[in-house]
Image (spheres, helix red, strand yellow):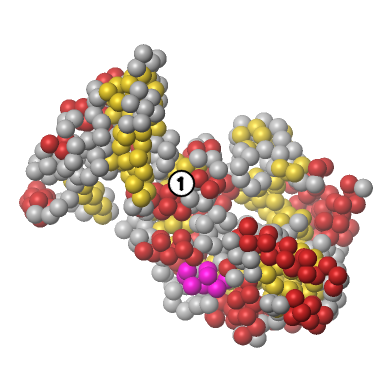
C-alpha cells in the first residue's frame, strides 16, 4: 500500500516534509489556508486542499478541519511539522481514533511533556540534572522557595512556551506580583495558570540533544546542537556540535537525553533541551520538544541522517535502520534563520512582496525555504523565510563559509534579518564561542541606545 | 490488483444488502466508488465542480429514487459538459457564487432519502438553507445569503469541499 501523508503545516517545513515523502515514494496532501494557495509547498504536494481562512485558528490550528481533510483525502498518516497542532495530545488522540497515524510521540508522552513541571519531575526521577526550582501554593511557600533557590529567579508557566508567561524576579519585593502576573498571563495564553520557579542562569549556553525512537524499543541520540544566539527566546543561529562542551559533560548530556527517551518510551523525533553553565561546567534540564525542530538540518549535516525520513518511518512502525554505533559525528554545521523581520526595529515583522530572491550560488550549502521571487510573504504567520545551512570540517571554517554565503545572498522587497546574521557571524563574541542565551538581547539593546 | 466482472458483481451484490449511500474502496491502483442515487463523480475538487452539476440537474430529485441499484462509478471519465454553461470561477453578471464557509463533506439533503434543501431552478430566500457541510460529525448549514434562483449546483453529495469552494451559482433576484 502506498502511504499517503497529510501535511498539517506550512512554510519551509511543509516543503521539507514533502521532500522526505517524495524520496520515500509516498503521496502527500497539503492542507493550506486560503492565503497559502500559491506557496511552494502547494505547488509541490501531490494534492492541496484549502482547509480554512488565513488566520491560523481558522486553518492550521483548526483541528477538526485538518482531521476531516486528512480523512476525506484518504491519508494514512499525518505530519504536524512544528508549532500549530504538533504538540497537542487531544489532536494526536483524535488522529488515532480515526485510523490516522500521528507522526509524533504518543498522546501520553505529549501530555507529560506539555506540562513542564511533570517533565521536570520526570527528569529528576531518572537522575537527570535539573536547575534549582519548584512550585508552591501559598505566598509564604513561594518566598521560601525563592530564598532557597537564590535570586534572581524566573517565574515560568508550566504549560507555556516561547517566553510567554515568563517573568524575571531580581528580589523578594517583586516576587508576589510577578508570580500572580505570570499566572494570569499563563491562564489567558495557555488556559492553565500553573507557574513555577527556576533559578535564572545569567550566563548559560543553550544545548539540546536530538533523540529518535521507534515502536520496537530502539532509541538513539544524534548528538547535540547549540542554539545560544536567541532574541527574546527565539533562536536565530544554531550549530552542531556545541564546541564549548568538555567531552565528559557531552557524554553526560547524551546519556541524560537517552534516559528521558527511555522513560517516555519515546517514538519519533524529539529534542531534549538543557542549559549549560560554562563557568561551573553544569548542565540543567529545561524541557523536551516532542517534534521535529526548526534547526534539525545542522544535525543532519554532521550525521548524514535524514531525520524527517527516519521520523516518518519510525512512527509508521518500521524498526530503526541505524544503531547508536552507526551515528558518527563529523565536522561542524551552522544554520542561520533568515526571517522577514527588521533588525533596525527590534526585529519587528516585515511582511510583503519578495521582489528579488537570489540565494548564494556557492556549492555544497543547503537552503531550506518556501520562498521564491514574486512570493507575497503573508502577515498571518511566523517570520521564517528560510534556513541557510553550511558545513565545514571545523567551526572556524564553517563561520567563514557562512559569511561568504550570506554576503552574496540578495533579498529585496522587504526587510530581512540578513544584515543582523552577517553582523553576528563577524562578531568577536560569536567567533570566540563566548555567546550565551542573553547575548543577542544585550547586543541589540546597545545598538538601539 | 485487477478485478474481473464476476468479482465486481459479487461486491455490488454484497453492497446491495447493506444500508449505504456512498462506498469508496482503494487498494493500490484500484479505486472503486459506488453510490446509491443514480449519479456519480470522482475528481479532484478543482476539476470536478463543473462536471458534477449536469448529473445533479439531470436528477434533481435524487432522493426520489432511494431504491435505485448501486451504480459502480467510473473513476476517471466524468461527463465533460459544464453545468448549464456556468464556470464556477467566472460567473456571469447577475450571478453570485455561494461558497463553502469551511472544509468538510457536502450534503444536499438533511439525511439520505430526504428531499433536497434546494435544486436547480428553485427560488430561494437569503436565509434559505442550501446544503450542509459536515466537519468531524458536526453539521453546518450553508444559507443562500441573497434572494434568487439556483442557476447551478457544482458539487455532489459526499464530495470533499474546500474552504471557499463555489458550491452553487445563484441568479440574484432583480
Q: Horizontally, is A425 left or right of B168 in the view?
A: right
In the rendered image, the quadrant that contains the N terminus of chain A is bottom left
Q: Residue furthest right?
A: A449
Q: Which residue is mark 1?
A: A31
- Dot 1 alpha-carbon crowd within 10 angstroms: few under 14, some 14 to 19, many 20 or more: many
In reply to whether residue A110 is colored magenta, the answer given is yes
Q: Nearer the viewer, residue A303 or B168?
A: B168
Residue B164 location, quadrant? top left
Whole-percent x, y for residue A425 in the image: 81, 53
Q: Horizontally, is A378 left or right of A309 in the view?
A: right
Q: Nearer the viewer, residue A65 or B149?
A: B149
Residue B161 location, quadrant? top left
Whole-percent x, y for residue A33 in the image: 50, 42
Q: Residue A42: in sight, yes or no?
A: yes
Q: Secondary structure at mark 1?
A: strand
Q: Horizontally, is B135 left or right of A396 in the view?
A: left
Find the magenta span and give its range.
Answer: A106-113
Give the prevailing secondary structure in the magenta stretch: helix
Question: Residue visible at 80% across and 42% down?
Answer: A345
Whole-percent x, y for residue A444 in the image: 85, 51
Whole-percent x, y for residue A140 in the image: 76, 79
Amino acid at each position: 500500500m502506498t502511504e499517503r501523508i497529510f501535511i498539517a503545516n506550512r512554510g519551509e517545513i511543509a516543503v521539507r516534509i514533502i521532500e522526505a515523502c517524495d524520496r520515500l515514494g509516498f503521496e502527500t496532501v497539503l492542507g493550506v489556508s486560503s492565503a497559502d494557495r500559491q506557496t511552494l509547498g502547494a505547488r509541490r504536494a501531490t494534492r492541496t486542499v484549502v482547509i480554512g481562512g488565513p488566520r491560523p485558528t481558522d486553518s492550521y490550528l483548526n483541528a477538526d478541519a485538518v482531521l476531516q481533510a486528512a480523512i476525506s483525502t484518504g491519508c494514512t498518516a499525518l505530519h504536524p511539522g512544528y508549532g500549530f497542532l504538533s504538540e497537542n495530545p487531544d489532536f494526536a488522540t483524535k488522529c488515532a481514533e480515526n485510523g490516522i497515524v500521528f507522526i509524533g510521540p504518543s498522546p501520553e508522552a505529549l501530555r507529560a511533556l506539555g506540562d513542564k513541571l511533570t517533565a521536570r519531575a520526570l527528569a529528576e526521577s531518572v537522575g537527570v540534572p535539573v536547575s534549582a526550582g519548584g512550585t508552591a501554593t501559598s505566598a509564604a511557600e513561594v518566598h521560601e522557595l525563592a530564598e532557597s533557590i537564590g535570586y534572581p529567579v524566573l517565574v515560568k508557566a508550566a504549560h507555556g512556551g516561547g517566553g510567554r508567561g515568563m517573568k524575571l524576579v531580581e528580589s523578594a519585593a517583586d516576587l508576589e506580583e510577578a508570580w500572580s502576573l505570570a499566572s494570569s498571563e499563563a491562564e489567558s495564553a495557555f488556559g492553565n495558570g500553573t507557574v513555577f520557579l527556576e533559578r535564572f542562569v545569567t550566563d548559560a549556553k543553550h544545548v539540546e540533544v536530538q533523540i529518535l525512537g521507534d515502536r520496537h524499543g530502539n532509541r538513539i541520540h544524534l548528538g547535540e546542537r547549540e542554539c545560544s544566539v536567541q532574541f527574546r527566546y527565539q533562536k536565530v543561529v544554531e550549530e552542531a556540535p556545541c564546541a564549548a562542551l568538555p567531552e565528559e559533560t557531552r557524554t553526560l548530556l547524551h546519556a541524560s537525553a537517552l534516559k528521558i527517551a527511555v522513560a517516555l518510551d519515546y517514538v519519533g523525533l524529539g529534542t531534549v533541551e538543557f542549559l549549560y553553565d560554562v563557568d561551573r561546567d553544569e548542565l540543567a534540564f529545561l524541557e523536551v520538544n516532542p517534534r521535529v525542530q526548526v534547526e534539525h538540518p545542522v544535525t543532519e549535516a554532521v550525521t548524514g541522517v535524514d531525520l524527517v525520513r527516519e521520523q516518518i518511518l519510525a512512527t509508521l512502525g518500521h524498526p530503526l535502520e541505524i544503531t547508536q554505533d552507526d551515528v558518527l559525528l563529523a565536522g561542524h554545521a551552522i544554520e542561520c534563520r533568515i526571517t522577514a523581520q527588521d533588525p533596525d526595529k527590534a526585529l519587528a515583522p516585515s511582511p510583503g512582496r519578495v521582489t528579488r530572491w537570489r540565494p548564494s550560488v556557492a556549492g555544497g550549502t543547503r537552503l531550506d525555504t518556501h520562498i521564491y521571487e514574486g512570493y507575497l510573504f503573508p502577515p498571518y504567520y511566523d517570520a521564517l523565510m528560510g534556513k541557510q545551512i553550511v558545513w565545514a570540517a571545523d567551526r572556524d571554517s564553517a563561520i567563514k563559509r557562512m559569511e561568504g554565503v550570506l554576503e552574496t545572498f540578495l533579498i529585496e522587497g522587504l526587510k530581512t534579518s540578513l544584515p543582523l546574521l552577517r553582523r553576528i557571524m563577524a562578531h568577536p563574541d560569536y567567533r570566540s564561542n563566548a555567546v550565551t542565551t542573553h547575548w543577542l538581547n544585550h547586543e541589540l539593546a546597545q545598538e538601539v541606545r | 490488483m485487477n478485478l474481473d466482472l464476476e468479482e465486481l458483481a459479487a461486491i455490488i451484490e454484497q453492497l446491495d444488502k447493506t444500508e449505504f449511500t456512498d462506498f469508496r474502496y482503494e487498494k493500490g491502483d484500484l479505486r472503486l466508488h459506488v453510490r446509491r442515487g443514480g449519479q456519480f463523480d470522482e475528481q479532484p475538487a478543482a476539476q470536478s465542480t463543473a462536471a458534477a452539476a449536469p448529473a445533479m440537474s439531470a436528477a434533481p430529485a435524487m432522493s426520489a429514487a432511494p431504491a435505485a441499484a448501486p451504480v459502480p462509478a467510473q473513476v476517471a471519465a466524468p461527463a465533460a459538459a459544464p453545468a448549464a454553461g456556468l464556470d464556477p470561477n467566472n460567473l456571469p453578471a447577475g450571478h453570485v457564487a455561494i461558497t463553502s464557509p469551511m472544509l468538510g463533506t457536502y450534503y444536499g439533503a438533511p439525511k439520505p432519502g430526504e428531499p433536497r434543501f434546494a435544486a436547480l431552478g428553485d427560488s430561494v430566500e437569503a436565509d434559505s438553507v442550501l446544503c450542509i457541510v459536515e466537519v468531524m460529525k458536526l453539521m453546518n448549514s450553508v444559507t443562500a445569503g441573497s434572494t434568487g434562483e439556483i442557476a447551478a449546483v457544482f458539487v455532489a453529495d459526499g464530495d470533499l469541499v474546500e474552504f471557499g469552494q463555489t458550491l452553487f451559482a445563484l441568479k440574484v433576484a432583480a
